[in-house]
Image (cartoon, grey):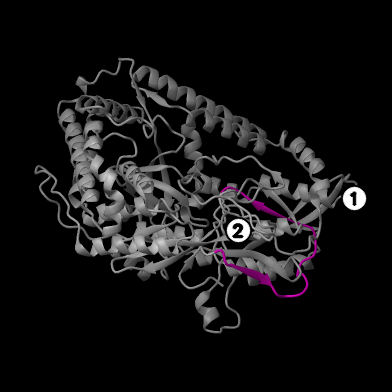
């Protein structure tokens, strides 16, 4: 079972979603014509900062010497956390902060928060200046902006030097204003609507600055420090911690997405499996929500610059009500938007039950029945189990019941589909593995002192002995990787899909005098001695993926703990698939080259990669329109090739595609459409079963 206070990645995502879905009470709006007042630290925050430093030094898995070098890392991370696009701080600010950089190690150890708040207040001054700059130019109208001039805007400035002076800053802000105007014009807004929307947006930014408090500064600073240990170590303020404790047992009524603030935007971190957003099949990780409308006809309210909790208050709502989201897709580098309709529903992770079906696959002229069990998460009813209820709900119990039914139908093979499964109960991963292996170890946990503890399957025999495969993708993490890794190490089944996430660490929640600290205290290792951390599980047969490994996955996170190995533990392999893999891969590649869904995935991956690598956008209106037309034309061609292969009517434009995708009948049809990737996994398993396979 999961130890008290320990959480896996899936639970961490739940924590984030609860944090972001709790609306806090704010003070009444202040007069935004007055300067934003400076913030000051509290004694409780100073004490908490010392506690955090000491607790991480004693208990974290990674040992970090808080010397000048690591303190400078905290300093740089703090600056980049506040100003990730290098649009606010000037070079003269960085020079003025030099004493803070040099003495930050001492400040951290003694609880001196003056450097943190001085930097945060300077950031707020620049953010206020930018909002007022934008409002002043919008008052002058759009005629002062020349959209015929051949200018460009660098999209991602995180690696750019700090702005040299006020003149360079004004020039950047002017270009950013032009970019915002062009993006709205390309979304068919009139100039009058654009001015009104951008004024409201920048007024929201000012209000957010007035509503920020000392806890905002403290959290940013302490999390900049905590982050140098690893990306899963995090400080939670008293209000955030209280909301988490109150709501861990409650269901949510919303869209089922984990959100975070990024600059002035609300960004989608992930979409919860089985939730309304996933069922709508539109919202994706990396998308930015810029507008929210209630019902079919409610006006879209601009939420750029709005506090995250206030924005989420608009997104949340009662079950069965419709919310309209105006979204900048992660792939839309030009700022073009889409409108997504999502019907709110309860989001309750424990209701994401395992399910099963049977598919028929043909290999070498012989048709075989392949059972497929889809597992969205590793769940268990802790309360019922602790209360001693005999029939408490759990992943392993449900899968066992499904397997019983599948065996009665005489399946020839089994697929466990873990795509999108972010983890959950470690004990369930252990118990589920036990259904497929004989008695033996399943995973090793090593703590910060190097001590190891082994999880075992202590039940003799196998509940299912037939051929099997496990499907994973980039969003399969934590407990999913433990299960898939064990199946692979034991040679019990093939692993098919794309490289998994790489979340191989254990976290614990520790109370502080002021808030709570989540810290990493252990790592997972497979029975082969390999950690699942950072590298994840590498499939035996790999499928293409739309997820960019540089953007999604443990190895994309700063200061992630490294992949490493320990001594393997004794375990007996069932099969050695290595001699069959070359032929299995060859047959798979021959089929996928002709499979319309695999071809579509490859084309979409190339399309996304092409526009992800775009470093700049044009600020010339005619050129920008041509660039957008080219992008949409390429996407339309890809969609029509797919539709032609399906025997569907070809589209005249992407607007027709968006209308179709919003149609409830189309969504039902897509849900019922055979999954080409499961079908191909079944064919691979069928090839493995086929006697004629060489090897």
Query: Which SS class for mark 2?
Result: helix
Quadrant including the N terminus: bottom right
Q: Earlier in the sequence, mark 1 or mark 2?
A: 2
Residue 467, position in %: x, y? 79, 58
Tell me the quarter of the picture where residue 528 sits: bottom right
Check disc 1 and report its element: helix, strand or loop: loop
As drawn, 521 above or below 186: below
Q: Which residue is mark 2?
A: 480
Q: Residue at x 69, y 70 (%)?
A: 400
> In the rendered structure, which segment of residues is drawn in magenta?
450-474
* Magenta span includes 521: no
Depth-wise, is mark 1 or mark 2 nearer the camera?
2
Is 471 magenta? The answer is: yes
Please tell me which residue lies in front, 234 or 638.
Answer: 234
Counting from the top left corner in percent of width and height, residue 539 is at 68, 48
Q: Residue at x 72, y 69 (%)?
A: 440
Mark 2 residue crowding within 10 angstroms, few (<14) / some (14–19) / many (20+) = many
How far is disc 1 from disc 2 in space, using C-alphas? 31 Å
10 with respect to 242 (left or right)? right
Q: Position of residue 164 (x, y in %)?
A: 25, 27
Q: Residue at x 64, y 64 (%)?
A: 443
Left or right of residue 188: residue 467 = right
* Residue 309 in view (yes/no): no
Q: Nearer the viewer, residue 161 or 379?
A: 161
The residue that label 1 is drawn on is 691
Q: From this view, report whether residue 324 is shown above or below residue 638.
A: below
Residue 495 versus residue 264 in the image, above or below = below
Determine which quarter of the picture holds residue 624. top left
């Amino acid at each position: 079972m999961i130890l008290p206070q320990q959480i896996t990645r899936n639970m961490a995502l739940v924590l984030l979603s609860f944090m972001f879905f709790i609306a806090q009470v704010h003070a009444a709006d202040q007069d935004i014509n007055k300067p934003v007042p400076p913030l000051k630290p509290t004694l409780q925050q100073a004490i908490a900062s010392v506690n955090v430093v000491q607790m991480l030094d004693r208990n974290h898995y990674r040992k970090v010497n808080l010397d000048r070098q690591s303190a400078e890392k905290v300093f740089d991370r703090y600056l980049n956390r506040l100003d990730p696009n290098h649009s606010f701080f000037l070079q003269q600010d960085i020079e003025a902060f030099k004493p803070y950089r040099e003495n930050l190690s001492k400040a951290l150890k003694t609880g001196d928060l003056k450097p943190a708040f001085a930097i945060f207040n300077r950031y707020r001054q620049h953010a206020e200046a930018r909002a007022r700059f934008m409002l002043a130019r919008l008052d002058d109208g759009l005629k002062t902006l020349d959209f015929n001039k051949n200018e460009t805007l660098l999209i991602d400035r995180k690696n750019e030097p700090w702005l040299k002076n006020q003149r360079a800053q004004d020039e950047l802000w002017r270009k950013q204003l032009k970019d915002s105007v062009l993006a709205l014009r390309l979304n068919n807004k009139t100039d009058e609507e654009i001015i009104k929307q951008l004024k409201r947006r920048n007024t929201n930014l000012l209000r957010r600055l007035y509503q920020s408090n000392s806890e905002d500064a403290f959290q940013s600073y302490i999390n900049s420090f905590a982050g140098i240990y690893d990306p899963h170590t995090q400080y939670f303020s008293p209000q955030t911690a209280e909301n988490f404790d109150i709501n861990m047992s409650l269901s949510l009524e919303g869209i089922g997405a984990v959100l975070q603030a990024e600059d002035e935007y609300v960004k989608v971190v992930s979409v919860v499996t089985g939730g309304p957003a996933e069922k709508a099949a539109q919202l994706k990780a990396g998308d930015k929500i810029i507008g929210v409308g209630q019902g079919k006809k409610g006006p879209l309210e601009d939420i750029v610059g709005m506090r995250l909790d206030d924005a989420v208050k608009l997104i949340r709502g009662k079950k069965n009500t419709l919310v309209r989201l105006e979204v900048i897709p992660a792939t839309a580098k030009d700022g073009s938007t889409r409108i997504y309709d999502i019907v709110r529903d309860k989001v309750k992770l424990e209701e994401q039950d395992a399910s099963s079906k049977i598919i028929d696959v043909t290999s070498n002229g012989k048709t075989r029945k392949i059972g497929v069990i889809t597992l969205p998460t590793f769940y268990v009813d802790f309360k019922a189990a602790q209360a001693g209820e005999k029939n408490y709900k759990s992943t392993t119990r449900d899968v066992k019941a499904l397997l019983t039914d599948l065996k009665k139908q005489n399946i020839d093979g089994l697929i466990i589909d873990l795509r999108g499964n972010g983890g959950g109960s470690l004990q369930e991963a252990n118990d589920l593995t036990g259904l497929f292996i004989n008695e033996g170890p399943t995973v090793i946990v090593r703590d910060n002192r190097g001590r190891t503890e082994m999880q075992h399957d202590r039940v003799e025999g196998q509940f299912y002995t037939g051929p099997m495969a496990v499907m994973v993708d980039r969003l399969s993490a934590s407990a999913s990787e433990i299960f898939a890794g064990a199946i692979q190490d034991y040679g019990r089944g093939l692993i098919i899909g794309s490289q998994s996430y790489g979340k191989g660490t254990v976290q614990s929640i520790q109370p502080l005098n002021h808030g709570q600290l989540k810290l990493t205290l252990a790592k997972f290792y497979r029975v082969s001695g390999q950690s699942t951390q950072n590298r994840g599980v590498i499939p035996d047969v790999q499928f293409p993926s739309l997820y960019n490994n540089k953007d999604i996955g443990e190895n994309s996170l700063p200061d992630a703990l490294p992949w490493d190995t320990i001594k393997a533990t004794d375990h007996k392999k069932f099969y050695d698939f290595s001699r069959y893999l070359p032929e299995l891969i060859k047959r798979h590649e021959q089929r996928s080259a002709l499979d319309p869904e695999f071809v579509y995935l490859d084309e979409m991956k190339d399309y996304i990669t092409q526009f992800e690598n775009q470093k700049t956008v044009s600020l010339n209106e005619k050129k920008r329109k041509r660039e957008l037309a080219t992008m949409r034309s390429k996407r339309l061609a890809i969609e029509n090739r797919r539709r032609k292969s399906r025997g569907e009517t070809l589209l005249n434009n992407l607007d027709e595609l968006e209308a179709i995708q919003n149609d409830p009948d189309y969504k039902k049809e897509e849900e019922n459409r055979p999954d080409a990737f499961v079908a191909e996994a079944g064919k691979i398993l069928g090839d493995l079963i086929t006697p004629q396979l060489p090897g």
